[in-house]
Structures are given as structure tokens and as C-alpha cells.
Image (cartoon, coloured by chain):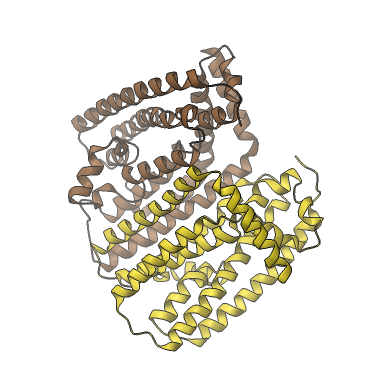
Amino acid sequence: MKKYFKIWKIIIQNSYIRDSQINGVIFFDILISLFDIVMTVVLIRVIFDHVTDLAGWKYHEVLFIYCIMKLTGAISGFIYSKGLRKVASEQIRKGDYDFYLAKPANPLILVSIGQPRIYLILNILAVIGLLIYSMINLNYQFSLLNIIFFFTLFITGQILFFFLTVISVVPTFWFVRLFALRDIMNRALQFARYPAGIYSKFLQAILFAIFPILVVTYLPAVVLFKAPEISYVIYAIIITIIFAFIAIYLWKMGEKHYGSASS
Amino acid sequence: MKKYYSYLVMCLKSFATYKADYFLYMAINMVFFYISIALWLTVYKSGNISEINTYTISNTITYYLLTSLIFRIDLSGTIYLGEEIWSGQFTNDLVKPWRVISVHLMATLGEVIISLISFIPFLLFMMLTSARYISAPSLLNFSAFIVTLVLAFAMNFFFNLIFHSLTFRYGDRSTMISLVNFVSSFLAGAVFPLAFLSGAYLNFAMLLPFKYLFHTPIEIFLGKMSLGQILSSWAYILVWTLFFYFIFKIVYTTGLKRYDGVGR
């Protein structure tokens, strides 16, 4: 574990040096992300001009759910999503994955942490700002249990999201040119923008169990604002463990299929 | 003319090589449509709303179906002029006996055509699964919708070329181009119908030419514009196209003088 933290520290330092050279690119990248937030806030405002609640959730609660979803996107972008996307777009196709296989460390961890986008810290701060704003406006009194359950589910959700992202890029070992795999998690995360109640029961079942994206963002909000149910926490932990096994197993299968030849 | 046609055919073959990639991309993009249906059905039902600024639930869902179609002719990722200037690959186009911009137009058209063809099965699937909410247009409105899309495509092409040409002077503009397209698509009504806005926000969006990319074609499709309004929209699009073309020409010509062909 200590080894990986050391590697990550060096990667972060390199990333800082690399990103410092392209200030303009980073500036516009951050602006895009901030504008996306503004756009969604406007959309939510437009919706609440016509209704008082959305599937039982008030304006600032919906804003809170959206913040959790954005935070998930920003945290994954900061740590691992670019690295995993590069696996899907380049490393397998060009044979660059050899570089990671030859190292005395877990290649999945190495490729995941290999391309951090440290400037996304600014996005994380902006989203946390919006999150605090929505909480202040809600003026709730949270119990200690609400808060403990929320943080447990939030951290579990982030781990689950990592394994879902891994699963989403695994097909690249078999289909070497499927650039669209890079975008799957971005699109899937869109399901987590709004309360689960807007979806049909059938779709909810899929989004809670088969592709459990709502466990990542919606359940933390439920235990904070609604009922602090221990069953939600247990369910999230069990499903995270299951998906961790699936992701690691599929990745290993993919590695066996990897021919190392570039195309 | 024949050489540009040959170039278009070559581009079509090139883009069609990786069909699986296009199909997967189209499939995952259907997500937005189904989320929008779920969202707006909840809003209309829970708010007991029959119309939002003349938009019924059928109009709203048809609106989102059409935005997913119009996104297929979105130019944010289909023009490579800036990338080629920055990499120096632009020199290859410059020394050949053709007009650089015509060649880029053919490449963009090629990608858009493949994107539209790949989208057809998914469009049919979306239409079938939401058939009871889809408003069908009259033949006249449908024809006017297609004409407006073609005109708006030309306008957007020259608008984007302006920012690509800035690469001559300021270097890599790719993220800036993404930002410009992101903002313009929001102001065009790609995220929700502009009619849902009110007051100053709506007036501001209506002043800009971006409404012709999404809002105006869809309003025509839904039969919300008279023939006179449609014709005047076309005239405005042509004026904006000429305006963007002249700005592009100035930026491109002055930029070309600075081009050293080295690349990065």
C-alpha cells in the first residue's frame, strides 16, 4: 500500500509540472465544468418554477443529489478516470499496456492512477461550495447517525464507482478500437442527476442492482435526508464487494486475452 | 467538383471502417433521451401541468427526440482544422491542388452522414418506445425543418471555423472550441426548450444566432411557427452565415500569413 502512495505522490508531482505547461487548456476545461454546473442549476430552477417537489424531493435536496453526482465525477476525474479511459482509447490498441505489465506492481492500479487531473480540485471545491449552499438553505438538523451513514455510503459509493468504471473499459481487451467505451461512465452517471423516484420501478431495479449507479449518489442522500437505514449501508457494502470481484476477475480475463501487438 | 466528391466518398469509407464504435456511441447517447422523458413526465404529472409556455408533454418529449437527432450534426468534434494547424499536418492540405476549406467541409460532411446513418436504428427505437408521446409534423413543416437544419449547419460550420483559425495565432484552441460549443448549444436550447425560460433570459437567448441550431428547427417541426416566420428565420440564418464567413475569412487569411508549417 505504501508503495502505491509513493508512486502516486510522484505521479501527482509530474502531473503538476505537465499541467503547468498548458494553463490555457486547463482554464477552458475548468470553465466547461463550471458552466455545466450553471446549466444544470438553471434546468433545476426551471423545473421548480412549475413544481414544488420532484419525486418527493425539494429544490435544495435535488441540488444536493446533483452535487453528489458531480463530486463523484470530479473525484474520479482527479484520481483515475483519465487513466482508465486511456486504456480504452490507446494503451491496449497500441500495445502500451506492456509498460505496466512489466512493472513490479498491480497494473490495474498503475494505469488507474497514471493520469491524474489535479486541476479538478478546483471543480471539487466549487461543487462542495454548492453542496454547502444547498445544505444551509435546507436548514436541517441532522442526527449523528445520519452523518455517519452518509459518509460511509459516500465512501463506499466512490469505491463502487471505481469498479464500475473498470468494468466499463474491460471490453477494450477484446475490441481494440472502441473509443466510445471512454464515455460510458459519463453517460451512466447522468442517471444519478435526479432522484430515483422519477424512473420506473423496472429501471430503478436495474440502477440499484444490475448497474448500481444510484447506490453511488442517491443512497447517501437518502440516509442523510430521509431514513438512516442500516440495511442501505449493508446493501451498499455487499454490492461493492460483489462488483469489486467481478471487475478484478474480468480485468484478469482481459489481461489473458491481451496480445501485446499494436495496431 | 469531382475531386471533392471523391474526397467525400473516401471520408465516408474511412469513417465507416469502425462501425461498432459509432453504434456503441449512439447507443450510450440514448441515455439523455430516456432521462429527459422520465424527468419531464414526473414534472408534468406531479405538477398537474397540461402546458409549459405552449409546450405539452408530447411537444416536450418530441423536442428531446429531435435534440438527440440534431446532436448528430453537431460540429464540436467533427472539424479538424485547428488540430491540423497545431500539429503541422495542415501543410499537407495546403500544398495540394484543392481548397483547404472545401476539403474540411467534405470531411465534416462525411462524419455527419455516417453519424446520421448509424443513428437511424436508434432513432427508430426511441420513436417506437415513446410513440404515444411523439408529435408528428405536417409534410411542409418536416421539409422546412430539414431546410433549416441544412442552413444552420452551414452557419455553425463557419462559426466554428473562426475559432479553429485562431490556432494560427494563439496555438491549440481545442478546449476553447469545446467551451464555445458547449455554451452555444445551451443557448440554442439543446438542454431544454428555450420556451421554458422567461423574461430577460429568454430575450437574451432570442437575440443570439444559436437558437437556429436547435430551438428554431424544432419549433418549425412542432408547427409553432408560421410560414412568414419560417422564411424570415431562413433570411436571418443566411445573414448570420455571411457574417461568420467574413469574420472567418479575415481570421484565416491573417492567420495563414503567420503559419510556419513546423507543427508540434
Q: Position of residue A218 (x, y in %)?
A: 45, 72
- Quadrant (top left, top right, bottom left, bottom right) of the C terminus of chain B: top right
* Position above or below: A147 against A9: below
Left/right placement of residue B238 relative to residue A156 reads left
* Position above or below: B55 against B216: below
* Position above or below: B71 against A182: above
Q: Position of residue B56 (x, y in %)?
A: 25, 54
Q: Position of residue A166 (x, y in %)?
A: 65, 61
Among the chains pictured, the one given brown colouring is B
Q: For residue A123, which quarter of the picture?
A: bottom left
* Viewer-side residue, A105 vs B245: A105
Going 27% across and 41% down the picture, which residue do you hit? B219
The color chain A is rendered in: yellow
Q: Position of residue B259 (x, y in %)?
A: 53, 21
How many numbered tags mark residues here?
0
Visible residue check, residue A184? yes
Visible residue check, residue A55? no
Going 55% across and 48% down the picture, which residue do you hit? A20
* Viewer-side residue, A209 vs A139: A139
Going 60% across and 65% down the picture, which residue do you hit? A162
